[in-house]
Image (cartoon, rainbow, N blue to C red):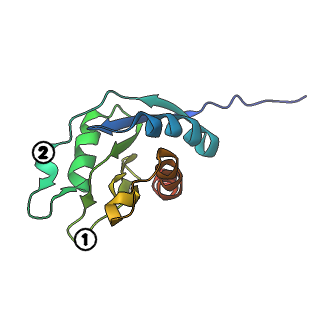
Amino acid sequence: MRISKTFKAEPLLIVPFGAVPKEVLECLQVELPRRFSFDIRIYKAEPIPQNAFNPKRNQYHSAKILKWLRGLQAKEERMLGIIDADLYVPELNFVFGEAHFAEKVCIISLERLHQEYYGLPENEKSLLITNLKRGGSRAWSHL
């Protein structure tokens, strides 16, 4: 006799902060289930928490955005925040993202994935998506 287990994908709620390109959200809806067996849901766009902004650095403190995400979080829900702004933690000049494994929250910045950030010609959306797939994998794996 064979006993089969029914596999249920774990839910992952993606929360865009500010203006996040539609192509990025579409990419995440396709790529994340392929890699991690997540059931993806896109939350409505949230305003970027202004208490996270540091005008001296012209960056957003990633831990403060993670705290905001936890405030939206339902019990046992995994959350991935996406922001097209520069992030930092006090000990570093910048971060591409930050994750809190125990709390099941993560934030990823698109800002430094754009070629034009480095003074290069504006990249196509496909290159941004490629960079997101590479850079995001590490953060997603913490969820």
> What is the x, y in percent for residue 137?
52, 54
Q: Quadrant of residue 3?
A: top right
Q: Quadrant of residue 20?
A: top left
Residue 94 visible from this viewpoint: yes
> Dot 1 lies on which element?
loop
Compared to 142, does 49 lie above or below?
above
**Which amino acid type corresponds to the residue marked 2 in the rendered image?**
Gln
> What is the x, y in percent for residue 80?
40, 43
> Dot 2 lies on which element?
helix
Residue that numbered label 1 is attached to: 93
> What is the x, y in percent for residue 35?
62, 46
In the rendered image, the residue lying farthest to the left is 56
First in residue order: circle 2 vs circle 1: 2
In the rendered image, the residue lying farthest to the front is 121
The residue at the point 32 percent across, 27 percent down is 44
Q: Residues within 10 Å of mark 2 (few under 14, many from 20)?
A: few
Q: Are marks 2 and 1 in contact (CB under 8 Å)?
A: no
The residue at the point 67 percent across, 32 percent down is 7
Whole-number angstrom distance, CA of label 2 to CA of label 1 = 19 Å
Q: Quadrant of the N terminus?
A: top right
